[in-house]
Amino acid sequence: MTEESFIGVDVCKARLDVVILPTGEVTAFDNTQEGIQKFLKYLQDHRHADYL
């Protein structure tokens, strides 16, 4: 059975703060076009792109 993952994103003017549960992995990306592209790639690399 596959364990469910949840992604929390706190969006503010300067950055996106991201946490993945249940692992507790935390990261941040600049809230710019480039930062958002990096965030989307991060989701794909972590197999969470299904939630977009």
Image (cartoon, rainbow, N blue to C red):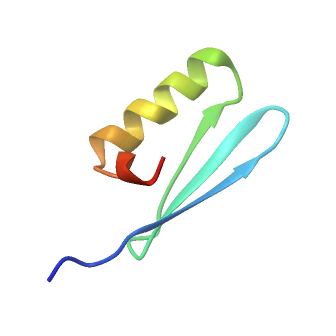
Q: Position of residue 2 (x, y in %)?
A: 19, 76
Residue sitting farthest toward the left: 1
Say how many tags the image has.
0
Relative to 46, does residue 13 appear above or below in the rendering? above
Q: Residue at x 64, y 17 (%)?
A: 33
48 or 23: nearer the viewer: 48
52 or 37: nearer the viewer: 52
Relative to 40, does residue 34 appear above or below in the rendering? above
Residue sitting farthest toward the bottom: 1
Q: Residue at x 71, y 29 (%)?
A: 31
Q: Residue at x 26, y 78 (%)?
A: 3
Q: Is residue 46 left or right of residue 9?
A: left
Q: Is residue 47 left or right of residue 35?
A: left
Q: Position of residue 10 (x, y in %)?
A: 72, 53
Q: Is residue 14 left or right of residue 22?
A: right
Residue sitting farthest toward the right: 13
Q: Is residue 44 left or right of residue 7?
A: left
Q: Position of residue 5 (x, y in %)?
A: 38, 70
Q: Position of residue 42 (x, y in %)?
A: 39, 38
Q: Which quadrant would the N terminus be assigned to in this image? A: bottom left
